[in-house]
Structure formats: C-alpha cells, structure tokens
C-alpha cells in the first residue's frame, strides 16, 4: 500500500504542478499574499505532523470566529478560497504529505489536537494506528459538513465535538476492519465523483452495512 501511495502521489504532484503554480501566483497576488497553510494535526500512532494546504482563509482564522471548524459562507474564507474549497483544490498540497510518509491517499482524516481528544476512546485506539489520509469514507459522507454546522441553532463547536466527531470516528473504525486495496479504490472513485455530484449516495451501495445516523446518513 505504501508503494501505491508513493507512485500515485508522485504522479499527482507532477500532473498538478502547472495548475499548482497558477494557483500559487493568484494566492500570492490576492488575499493576504500567503500560498500555503501548515496546521498541526494528529497522525499515525498519535504523533503530530503539519498538514499542507493552499491558503483559503484569513491569517489567524483558528483563533477567531468558529475557530477550528468552517461554517457555510464563513466570513474568514478568502474570495478564491471558497472556490478552492468547493473543488477540493486546496487539498492537493497534501500529496506532498503522502509522498514524505505523513499521510496516505486513503485513511481517516487527521484532526487537530482538541478534536482528536474528543474521539471516543474505543475508536481512538484503532484509528491512531492507521496512517491518516487525504480522503476517507467519513470525509465523503461529510463532504458538505459546513451545511450541517450552518443548519444548527446551538454552538457549532459543541455540535462538531459531540455529534460529528463521534459519528465520523464510528465510520472510520468500521472501515478500518474492511480496509483493502479494492475498498480504497472505491473511496478514491467516490471522492472524485462527489466533486461533480456532491449529493450522490453511492457510498451506501458500495459499502453495505455502513453505520447510519438519522442526521448525517439516514436510511
């Protein structure tokens, strides 16, 4: 699997390089002049690393507004940032994380420290021994996560901690017991599909028995 990650991430970096340079120039000339955003996340064996993304929000955004989560129409998001987030182009620099071994193509999404600590312990132990990924079954189901946060009337950070993180963890724990190359390819396919068809529910057909939730993934 590691060889698979290295080969595909290298191909992705080379293929994306021209567009990446173009995006970098736009970011440098607009917004606040920053190109990359490095954020500490918890990875394999509960060790921290810095995830690499294209900048989509104003500086110091983790310390203002909704802090570590992003709401729909969040005022901290830069004009080009909303486009990068919608198309997932902001995630492409993470192929560098994959290439150097911090991440895998498919695996549980790495969380910031306070979110990682909110994972129920019975799931945290299993998830922590998996290399985090650019995409996962949980991130596919929560591809419109901002909508859920925008629809609630209570504190968004509390909702994320008490509702979203536990369910995401349950999904990743469930998937960890079924992880193989075929299922990883299914997730990569669904990730690309969700960009063009964000409301599709194909994951429920490709992964029979996936844990359900009355709000996030109803029957």
Image: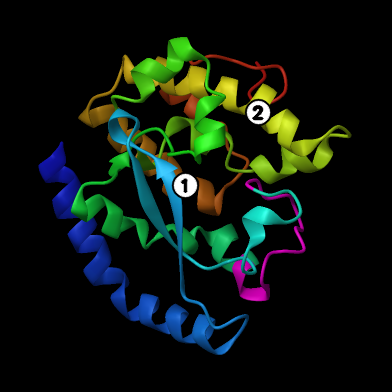
Quadrant into which the C terminus falls: top right
Callout 1: helix, strand or loop?
A: helix
Tell me which residue sits at (82%, 38%) in the image.
151
Q: Can residue 46 be seen in this view?
A: yes
Residue 67 shown in magenta: no
Callout 2: helix, strand or loop?
A: helix
Tell me which residue sits at (68%, 74%) in the image.
79
Tell me which residue sits at (86%, 32%) in the image.
154
Q: Position of residue 15 (x, y in %)?
A: 26, 70
Residue that carries the numbered disc 2 in the rendered image: 161
Residue 17 picture quarter: bottom left
Seen in the picture, residue 43 relative to 87 is either above or below; the reply is above
Q: How would you rate the neighbour count of disc 1 (Cα within 10 Å): few for under 14, some for 14-19, many for 20 or more?
A: some
Q: Position of residue 202 (x, y in %)?
A: 50, 31
Dot placed on the residue nearer the N-terminal end, 2 or 1: 2
The count of marks equals 2
Q: Can residue 208 be seen in this view?
A: no
Seen in the picture, residue 54 relative to 49 is either above or below; the reply is below
Q: Position of residue 173 (x, y in %)?
A: 41, 17
Mark 2 against mark 1, which lies toward the viewer?
2
Residue 193's disc number = 1
Distance, label 2 to label 1, CA atoms, is 28 Å
Main SS class of the magenta portion in the image: loop
Tell me where the magenta segment starts and ends, as one range: 68-81
């Amino acid at each position: 699997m590691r060889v698979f990650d290295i080969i595909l991430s290298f191909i992705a970096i080379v293929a994306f390089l021209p567009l990446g340079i173009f995006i970098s120039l736009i970011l440098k000339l607009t917004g606040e002049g920053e190109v990359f955003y490095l954020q500490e996340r918890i990875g394999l064996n509960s060790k921290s690393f810095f995830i690499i993304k294209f900048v989509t929000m104003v500086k110091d955004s983790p310390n203002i507004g909704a802090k570590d989560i992003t709401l729909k129409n969040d005022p901290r998001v830069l004009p080009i940032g909303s486009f990068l987030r919608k198309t997932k182009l902001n995630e492409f620099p993470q192929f560098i994380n994959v290439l150097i071994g911090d991440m895998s193509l498919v695996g549980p999404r790495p969380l910031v420290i306070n979110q990682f600590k909110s994972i129920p312990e019975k799931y945290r132990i299993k998830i922590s021994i998996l290399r985090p990924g650019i995409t996962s079954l949980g991130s596919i189901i929560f591809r419109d996560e901002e909508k859920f946060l925008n629809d609630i009337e209570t504190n968004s950070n509390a909702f994320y901690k008490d509702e979203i993180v536990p369910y995401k963890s349950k999904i990743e724990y469930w998937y960890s017991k079924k992880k193989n190359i075929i299922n990883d390819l299914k997730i990569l396919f669904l990730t690309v599909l969700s960009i063009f068809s964000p409301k599709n529910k194909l994951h429920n057909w490709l992964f029979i028995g996936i844990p359900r939730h009355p709000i996030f993934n109803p029957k």
